[in-house]
Amino acid sequence: MIVIVDYGAGNLTSVERAVSYIGFKSVITDDPKKIVAADKIIFPGVGAAGAAMETMQKKGIDIALKQSFNSKTPMLGICIGCQIIMDRSDENNAQCLGLISGETRAFSNQMAATFSDNYLKVPHMGWNGLKIVQEHPLFKGIEPKDEFYFVHSYFPVPINQENIYGTTEYGITFASTIGKNNLFATQFHLEKSGEPGLIILKNFCLWSPLK
Amino acid sequence: MLSKRVIPCLDVREGRTTKGIKFENNVDIGDPVEMARFYYEAGADELVFYDITASHERRNIMIEVVRRVAKTIFIPFSVGGGIRTLEDMRAVLLAGAEKVSVNSAAVKNPEIISQGAKAFGNQCVVLGMDVKHVGEKKGIPSGYEIVINGGRTYMGLDALEWAQKGQSLGAGEICLNSIDADGTKDGYEMNLTRLISDNVSIPVIASGGAGRPEHLADVLTDGHADAALIASMVHYGTHTIADIKSHLESRGIKIRKTRSTK
């Protein structure tokens, strides 16, 4: 069973609809027992890292996710789900799950001014490219020109290069897909990125890595 | 680099799409879900639905449309028109919209922006602004004034001040509609778009006046807009998303090429 984790961070139904559209069943839950028992885990989300972590801790979801990570259950983080797997976040100065070493940093408030010729705004909102820097089974079928939908003001900064699978340019180059063991996470919204997003989502639903 | 967005706007009345010219003589085009599918497959980067259903009792029809659209397309879409309360916003977002846009309700009660941003996140809240050029005068230092009721009611509110206030209240994006340019097909209001875009840090969608691909190219370069709204120029088949994007690309503008438009 594919479980979509509800930690009070926004629109889970859009991920459920996308999973259903590509032919898989999923359940939305905030129950740590169901999360630990899942075959696969998706943790999507919009909102703030601090509030997300608070909800997780209150419900014991943080412990469940760490346990699932250690037992190598395939896991997919989306947007906030790509940020809270780091050690900490600039957003609300939140302590996070620490599944991948490093932190989540804010795009500079000065970006609009610094890059005034290009009018870079924060949040980084819209369609942007993905440069694959390391092959991964979930990238199967992705083409160099494919773009993905982003909405975020923070981005993950892994300490170890080996955790970075793809990067995106927005004034700076940042890690937009990261992973470790059977955990994979995208800063962009797979459920809102048209066909390329659905391809990665489907690859995840079909993924059966060694445990 | 970030691509500039091309966003078709569908006016919906009681569950059917229309396109108004200067807000009058609306004609029925068809089923919003089928149009959404068509534009999704044609390479639209996002969609905007604007509910012009007059009767508040019949607004559930729109929620059902949103629900069906959300099962059909997998790109972001926003819903605006008649959003008055936090509950209206919640209903639209739960039905599957990515963003909700508030316009006249925010002018009357700015707190709805901060309440919406707090409850659902800034990225969910789009501030829709209808603007008319009135010339510089007392209380309107920018020369652009906020209007509501399709341009019939002047609010004595400066457009630039309102945009900045909307941002500070938590709007994640501005959809800037020029009532002067709307329906003319003569191009976007460039000065207004540049003025607002240069003085806020959130993305600005230009709206009103698009008739030819050149108009989008102009507003996305000289107009400093982040995205451009289009309606009749594609609804009536005069232009396609593909030929608009191909023109933008020829002007050196970064656009998203979908697999269908490649």
Image (cartoon, coloured by chain):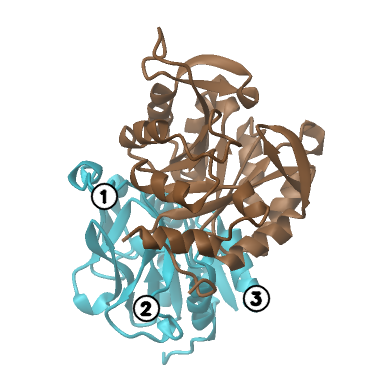
Pointer 3 with pointer 2, Cβ within 8 A = no
- Mark 3 packing: few (<14 Cα in 10 Å), some, or many (20+)? some
Q: CA distance from mark 2 to mark 1?
A: 23 Å
- Residue A95 vs residue B152, the one in the foreground: B152
Query: Residue B62, relative to residue A139: is it above or below?
Result: above
Q: Amino acid at mark 1?
A: Asn
Q: Which chain is in brown here?
A: B
Pointer 2 with pointer 1, Cβ within 8 A = no
Q: Amino acid at mark 3?
A: Lys
Q: Colour of chain A?
A: cyan
Q: Which residue is mark 3?
A: A25
Residue B99 percent coordinates (x, y) = 54, 47
Q: Which residue is mark 1?
A: A118
Give residue A161's quadrant in the image: bottom left
Q: Residue B81: in sight, yes or no? A: yes
Q: Is residue B6 left or right of residue A21?
A: left
Query: Which of disc 1 and disc 3 is earlier in sequence?
Result: 3
